[in-house]
Image (cartoon, rainbow, N blue to C red):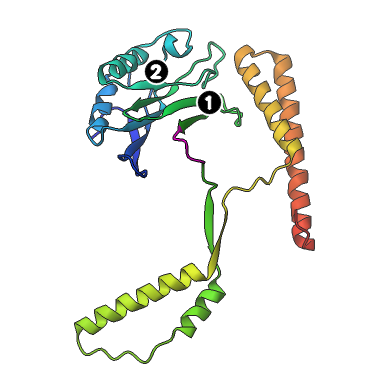
Amino acid sequence: MLRYVEATMVIANFPNMPPINFVSAYNPPSMTYVHFTLDFELIYAYNAAVFIAGDMTAKHKKWNCLKTCHFGKQLVNFANKTGAIIAAPVEPTHHHYRTNSVIDTALVRNIPYAVSALTLHELSSDHLPVKFHVDSGTPAEIPKTFIPNWRKFKQHLINQAHEIFAPKNTDDIDREIARFTAEIIQAYRESGSWTELIKNETTPEIREQIRVRNKLKRIWHDTRHPVVKNSLNRAQKYLRKLHRENDERRWNNFVTGIEP
């Protein structure tokens, strides 16, 4: 039972190596002067190989923060005592008009791979996402999803129709349930196809304008200069215009049957 941090954990199984527990954690800043790393001890108890990443609200000069806070000291001391490594990006993950800081880090323990972190500038928020790369030497898979064809699924079941079922005992019922379940699973697998889950539906111009908008947003957070604010508003307005035109174009292509 965790007392301070909020966490979600999944267990990843890899070939020829022990499983790794990947944990997404959040240390609320309102929990002032608590020893939040005590919860990490409980997480450690589940598995020796652990990857804990998230918003730790922990600042330390070791990962390019201008100052060190009590949470940062706790995290460094805990990592040193438990033989863990702290992976943090070089660029700030949180932008504030007072100071920028890196508060999103990872605690890596007993993982035999090099781990790196990169701040992503894909969002306009003052709190940026972080991408952690675990260099296992294996190529990354392209996310895919299975799209069933329900017409083929129905026809497959019709073609596999059996005689009228007349059970004589409970064993007959159990066997028929197992047979029918296997038949449904087979029909589902053979009636659909796999397709890539991620498709880029934006234009290069939109992606470039997003980068411009995000850069202006970060400068605005740092300076609060009215001229930058005006530039940011114009960039946001132009980005909405590009999105609107792209949506209209994709809709027209859909109506006319033209591939986008």
> Is 136 part of what is drawn in magenta?
yes
Label 2 and label 1: CA atoms lie apart by 17 Å
Under mark 1, the amino acid is Leu
> Is 224 part of what is drawn in magenta?
no
Looking at marks 2 and 1 on the same chain, the residue that comes earlier in the sequence is marked by 2
x%, y% of residue 197? 56, 51
Under mark 2, the amino acid is Ala
Check disc 1 and report its element: helix, strand or loop. Answer: strand
Asked if labels 1 and 2 touch by Cβ distance under 8 angstroms, the answer is no
x%, y% of residue 144? 53, 52
Total count of labels: 2
**Within 10 Å of the Cα at label 1, are there few (<14), some (14-19), or many (20+) other Cα atoms?**
some
Residue 239, disc: none
Q: Which residue is mark 2?
A: 58
x%, y% of residue 111? 35, 30
* 109 vs 145: above or below: above
**Given this view, does label 2 or label 1 mark the residue nearer the observer?**
1
Q: Residue at x 30, y 77 (%)?
A: 177
Magenta region, residue range: 135-139
Nearest the eye: 233 or 248: 248
x%, y% of residue 260? 75, 53
Q: Residue at x 48, y 84 (%)?
A: 158
Q: Which residue is mark 1?
A: 118
